[in-house]
Image (tube, helix red, strand yellow):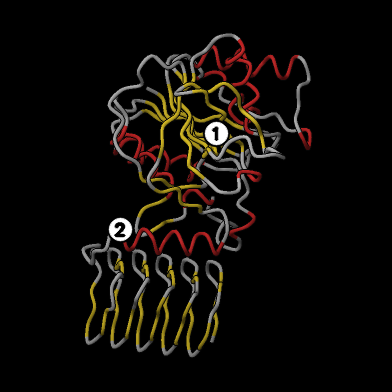
Amino acid sequence: MKLIIPMAGRGTRVRPHSHVTPKPLLNVRGKSMVERIVDTFNQMMPRPMTEGVFILAPDFGDDIKGQLTEICERHGMKAHFAIQESPMGTAHAVRAAKGHLSGEGVIVYADTLFYMDPLSDFGDADCVAWVKHVEDPSRFGVAVREGERIVEFVEKPTELISHEALIGIYYVKDLTQMAESIEYLFDNDLAGPGGEYFLTDAFDRMLKQGALFTTAGVTDWLDCGTIPALMETTQVVLEREDSLDGGGTATHSVIIPPVYLGPGAKVIGSVVGPNVSLEAGARITNATLRSSIVFAHAVVENASLCDSLVGQHASVKGFGGSINIGDHSTIG
């Protein structure tokens, strides 16, 4: 089974942290968003994933491909790559991987994380769309159901027709059939608002051709698309996976859970927590931190930080308050 992950977006809403690192490769409590997605779907689907298909932007280099290949290898998967030359919607992104659209697969967007119960089988469904109940569905695509069967997909409905928001996960039994429906959109210039081509429109065509669509749910749907959302999601993950066994050490310090100390992270003479994630090699000395993320190999010294993000290899010394600084930056 293939795991298809469109991740060509620029991650502008989590800058400066996405200037160097694509947003899906940012760590959330010790593990990148992409690897968390790969973990989830290998554990929760009826059959293991055997191939990962990553849809990238043209300027994503060999280093990024190498990281994604290593993630796949750790999960016994083969990595493939496709390039989306320009952002023209979700169907356009998936279409970029047309050389790999055969057999069965799961499509999942890389800017959200999920907790879900294991799915024992897909039943008779040609496609399964994962949904989450929301009070205001006007910001989302929604699935309209009759009984267990989806009868219509609607992007950002202007009137209340369903509370079941589509969260960007789809199982497809026959990726070739989906690819044909995507091509139909382009052949007939069926673009949606903003000139974008939506995957839900391709699914709607499959519905009209008689494909059976059903739904599945998640217990948690965690957004990572903005700085506040990334902070909130990290807090949820810390609470759910509370543990200090990440390999870091604390000396002459007070740790207030939940806190994650990544491999090689060091806390010396400091008060850290609650809701703090220190990634690999981070060093905290004579400081206080709460509700903050310190990325790999950053240094915080003689500082008091709250609600802050400190980029990789950054240095913060003698500062108090809330900050958001990117990789290799220096304050103090």
Q: Mark 1–mark 2 contact, CB under 8 Å?
A: no
Q: Between disc 1 and disc 2, whose residue precedes?
A: 1
Which residue is drawn at the image coordinates 55% and 43% (left, top)?
61
Amino acid carrying mark 1 in the image: Ile
The residue under label 2 is 240
The residue under label 1 is 55
The residue tagged with tag 1: helix, strand or loop?
A: strand
Amino acid carrying mark 2 in the image: Arg
Residue 228's x, y, as percent? 54, 64
In front: 136, or 248? 136
In front: 267, or 61? 267
In front: 1, or 162? 162
Decide if residue 160 is on the left or right side of residue 116: right
Residue 295's x, y, as percent? 43, 66
Alpha carbon distance from label 1 to label 2: 30 Å
Which residue is drawn at the image coordinates 40% and 78% (left, top)?
290
Which residue is drawn at the image coordinates 53% and 26% (left, top)?
145
Sort mark 1 into few (<14), some (14-19) or many (20+) by Cα contacts within 10 Å: many
The quarter of the image holding the N terminus is top left
Q: Quadrant of residue 78?
A: top left
Decide if residue 195 is on the left or right side of residue 231: right
